[in-house]
Image: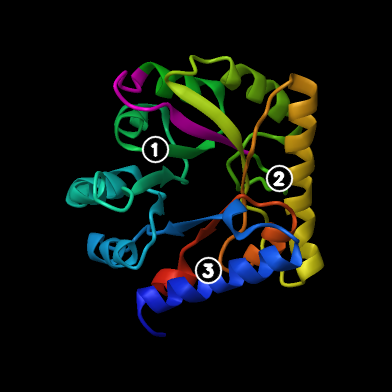
Amino acid sequence: MGSIGSRLQEVKRRIALACQMAARSENSVTLLAVSKTFDADAVREAHAAGQRAFGENYVQEALAKIEALADLRAGSGGGIEWHLIGPLQSNKTRPVAEAFDWVHSVDRLKIAERLAEQRPPGLPPLQLCLQVNISGEASKSGVAVEEAAALAAAVAALPRERVRLRGLMAIPEPAADPQAQRAPHRRLRELLQAINAQQGLALDTLSMGMSADLEAAVLEGATIVRVGTAIFGAR
């Protein structure tokens, strides 16, 4: 399998090739290394190999790592950045508002309101994405496609010095065929464009694509791809 550093380089190579195919700049896609269930040492190793943005699913597990790696926050060569990508319950918003840089999984207004209220004034605005249930699966969290525009308008109206709505996130149903993989990513991009047009917003972030389908996501406009297994190995 090689080291975390070598696997990281391989993922970056895949992103670069997909950007080439899509006639996009490599810099237009941010790699989010999904470190859930891996320990702080694995994150430190990835950071030493040049990775800066890390995604976590579970609040308590993430907080322990954020504390253990506090020295990397203001480190030279760019600090570490923490993204919450898992479901967020309203009783867990305070530690998230205090410790994270991004939350990708906002699916109702109450969560965004609490994050805005609880974001400490001295910190930069917390960057938010709305999680959309793009495949309409009963088991998946996320706002329904037809309710996303209204939620975006409400979240965008919250105090911008505390929270800033950046875009949409989705976890589509897995598909093996590249064309089938592209379809839900295309729907998410079209939804973002429609929301911008309808609500007069300038959302710029599409958080979509994982280890198995990052190429399809980049071809459809992903700006953040969330990759865990291909970097850290099987869970």
Image marks 3 and 1: residues in contact by CB distance under 8 Å: no
Front of the two marks 2 and 3: 3
Span shown in magenta = 118-131
Q: Relative to 164, does residue 117 appear above or below in the rendering?
A: above
SS label for mark 1: loop
Where is residue 79 drawn, in percent x and y?
31, 48
In depth, the one of 20 and 210 nearer the eye is 20
Front of the two marks 2 and 1: 1
Q: Which badge, 2 or 1, comes first in the chain's sequence?
A: 1
Q: Relative to 53, does residue 100 appear above or below in the rendering?
A: above
Please tell me which residue is depicted at 65% across the width and 32% down the height of the picture: 203
Check disc 1 and give the amino acid type.
Answer: Asp
Please tell me which residue is depicted at 79% across the width and 64% down the height of the picture: 180
Quadrant for the N terminus, please: bottom left
Check disc 2 and give the amino acid type.
Answer: Ile
Give me the C-alpha separation between circle 2 and circle 1.
Answer: 24 Å
Determine crowd level at label 2: few under 14, some 14-19, many 20+ residues with C-alpha closer than 10 A. many
Q: Which badge, 3 or 1, comes first in the chain's sequence?
A: 3
- The circle drawn on residue 12 is 3
Disc 2: which residue: 134
Check disc 3 and give the amino acid type.
Answer: Lys
Give me the C-alpha separation between circle 2 and circle 3.
Answer: 26 Å
Where is residue 198 drawn, in percent x and y?
79, 23
Q: Which badge, 2 or 3, comes first in the chain's sequence?
A: 3
SS label for mark 3: helix
Disc 1: which residue: 101
